[in-house]
Amino acid sequence: MEVDAEMVRQVALSAAATAVFIVAAVVVSSSYGDTATGTDLSPTGGLALVAVLGGFIVLMALAGLWLERQDFDS
């Protein structure tokens, strides 16, 4: 199975965006979570986590738009 340049770019961009989301979620959880148990999230932390999720959705939409507008044939 041959993998073309377009597929490699799509996978790399998706993997990078997912890694950014995971890192941001971990940072928010560790910053706003209860340090003793690590299970409780403050209301501010919940809002920050929702913002991270919304940012991920926007990032993936922009990445898809950018990939769609690229000319991989030339």
Image (spheres, rainbow, N blue to C red):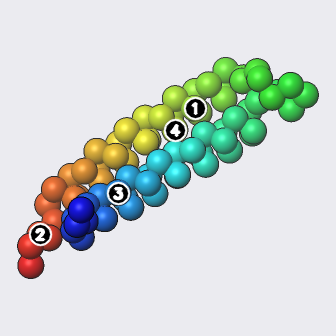
- Residue at x 68%, y 44% (from the top left corner): 27
Amino acid marked by disc 4:
Val
Position above or below: 48 against 13: above
- In the figure, 19 relative to 25: above or below? below
Q: Amino acid at mark 3?
A: Val
Which residue carries the number 1 mark? 49
Count neighbours of disc 1 (C-alpha within 10 A) and say few if under 14, some if 14 to 19, many if 20 or more: many
Residue receiving disc 2:
71
Residue placed under numbered mark 4 in the picture: 52
Q: Of discs 2 and 1, which sits in the foreground?
A: 2
Comparing labels 3 and 1, the label whose residue is closer to the camera = 3
The residue singled out by tag 3 in the image is 11
* Element type where label 4 sits in the image: helix
Mark 2 and mark 4: Cα distance apart in space: 30 Å
Side (left or right) of 32 relative to 67: right
Q: Position of residue 71 (x, y in %)?
A: 11, 69
Three-letter amino acid code of the residue under disc 2:
Asp
Tell which of 5 and 57 is nearer to you: 5
In this view, the residue farthest toward the bottom is 74
Sequence-wise, the earlier of marks 4 and 3 is 3
Q: Is residue 18 left or right of residue 32?
A: left
The CA span between labels 1 and 4 is 5 Å
User: Nearer the N terminus, badge 3 or badge 1?
Assistant: 3
Give how far apart the Cα atoms at labels 2 and 3 are: 17 Å
Element type where label 3 sits in the image = helix
20, 44: nearer the viewer? 20
Query: What's the distance in space between the residues labelled 4 and 3, CA to CA?
Result: 21 Å
Residue 4 lies, in percent from the top left, at 21, 68
Residue 20 at x, y = what percent?
A: 52, 52
Earlier in the chain: of badge 2 and badge 1, it is 1
